[in-house]
Structures are given as C-alpha cells and as structure tokens.
Amino acid sequence: MFKTYDIHNYSPAPSELIHFIVDDIKDSLHLDNRHIDKSHSHNFFSIMFIKKGKGRQIIDFESYNIKPNTIFFIAPGQVHRWVNPKFIKGSVLKFTEHFYTLHAKRESVLKDFTFMYGIKNRSCLFASEELFKKLYSTVRIILKEYNSSIDYKNEMLGVYLLQLLINLKRAIKSEGPCDNIDFNSTIAHQFKILLEEKYKESKSVSDYAKLLNLNVRRLTSITKRKYSKNVGVLIRERVILEAKRMLVHTGKSIAEISYDLGLEDPSYFTRIFKKHMKISPQQFRTNYR
C-alpha cells in the first residue's frame, strides 16, 4: 500500500509556515530519499521547476522523462515516484489548499487552476528556455520572501503564489486553442470540477448535465470538442484511474474497491475495468506488483 505524506514531514520552517514550503529540489529529494523510488502521494500541491537533470517521473501510471526546463504539477492524492533521478537542479513549491484559500484569498485551487490536476491528461509542461526563465524569476522572489523574517510574510507569499499560478495558466493557454476562454471552455472546466468531486457517487451523464443546466447532447458536444471524448468516457476514465491506484497501492479486495467507487456489483466493476484496460482487475494488480 502506498503512503500519503503530510507537508509537515518536509517542513524545516517555523510552524506558521507549515502550509507552505519552497526549497531547492536537491534538498527536497534528500528529505524524500527514503521513499522517492516507491509509489507515494502527498496531501498538498507540488510544483517542481527542473532546470537540469535526468531520469523519469511516473505519475498515475504515466511516465515522463526529466529534461531541462520541465515543470511538474502534482495534486493531492496523485500517486507518483522517481526513477533514477540524476543531477537534478531546480526548486519545488509545496502548499496546501488551506494556505491558498487563506493567503491567496481565493476559493479553491481546482476551481481556479485545473491544470494542477493535469494538462490535457499530462502532469507537466515542457517550457521553452525563455518561458522557464520568466516563470522561475517569480520562484526566486518567492524564495527570497520565504527566507525572510519580515511582517506579512504569509500574505506576500500568497500574492506571489497567485501570480505564479496565473502566469502558469497563461503559459499553458498559449499551448493551443483548446484552452481559449469561451463558453465551452468554461463549461468543460466546470465539468472537470464536478467530476473530481462526484465521480464516486454519480456515474450518470444526465446528472452532470443537470448540474450544469445543459442537456446531455450539449454537454457531450462540449467535451468532445475540448477533450476529444464524450462525457461517459471521461467519467469511466476517472473511475478507472482511481481503481488502478487502489489495485496497485492498497490491499483491498476487488469487491471492496468496487464498493469504495460507488459500484455495488463487483462483477459489473470487473466487466467495465476489463473492457477499458483489456485485462481483469486481478491481472492488472499482478502485473504492477
């Protein structure tokens, strides 16, 4: 079973900064050394700025090569591990939802910055050297503020964090037209938020359409345009992702996993898993262990 680490496990800072940490990525890897090669998750957000280095990161079963000017986004609950990291240079920001809402004065990371949960099913951005330098300049400002002992430090860190996230969002939007802000993008964004909140309890396309005040045909048209997938596929993919996490990283039985995912018939769960993955849940578990 994978472990979930708390931000307190990494904090050398005073207690008032326990919800926010920024440090050299080499120092972070040193603290992580006991488990970086083992699958684990965090209860906080991480943004890793890789200036140089080699190796791989595996995030929710997707493998990403580490190369210069790479930015990784890891959300709470995402299962990940490092594979042969070498010569890694850069910085990592760690922050909780509590810090974001309290000091950035916003409602939710997910509602504001969906990319923190994956960009078009990716958990990283391969930036140009120019873009990376621009974004990293804000990281340096954050690091300077973080290491200071002046009044209103948390408030300033919240401002700088929000600035960094906005600049990241702008950079990601420039990657392609599917991120343009329009009605369809707004609905697609809202659907992703609802899906993350309700995938265990609601598997019906009509439920999500009703919550978004749309008919099923309209919502399906939007998700096909934005994600090249219909609503039902996106719901199943989210359920299957959680099933894969639980199969590999917990000792729960197939039936227990089925019930946890809101599927009361384990045989039905097995059928949809096999249809999606081409192998049974038990075979998947065996292959990844």
Image: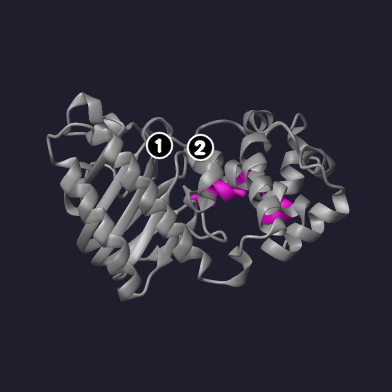
Is residue 241 magenta-colored? no
Asked which secondary structure carries label 2, the reply is loop
CA gap between label 1 and label 2 equals 7 Å
- Residue 75 percent location from the top left of the image: 45, 44
Residue 82 sits above or below residue 21 on the image:
below
Residue positioned 63% across, 67% down in the render: 178
What range of the chain is rendered magenta? 274-288
Q: Nearer the viewer, residue 53 or 115?
A: 115
Residue 38 in sight here? no
Name the residue type under label 2. Ser
Residue 282 in sight here? yes
- Residue 106 percent location from the top left of the image: 47, 37
Q: Are marks 1 and 2 in contact (CB under 8 Å)?
A: yes
Q: Nearer the viewer, residue 123 or 287?
A: 123
- Residue 107 percent location from the top left of the image: 51, 35
Residue 143 sits above or below residue 246 on the image:
below
> Which scheme is used to colour this image of the protein?
one colour
Residue furthest front in the image: 151
Residue positioned 47% across, 58% down in the render: 169
Is residue 284 magenta-colored? yes
Q: Nearer the viewer, residue 269 or 224?
A: 224
Name the residue beneath numbered marker 1: 100
Name the residue beneath numbered marker 2: 108
- Is residue 205 left or right of 166 when viewed as pictured? right
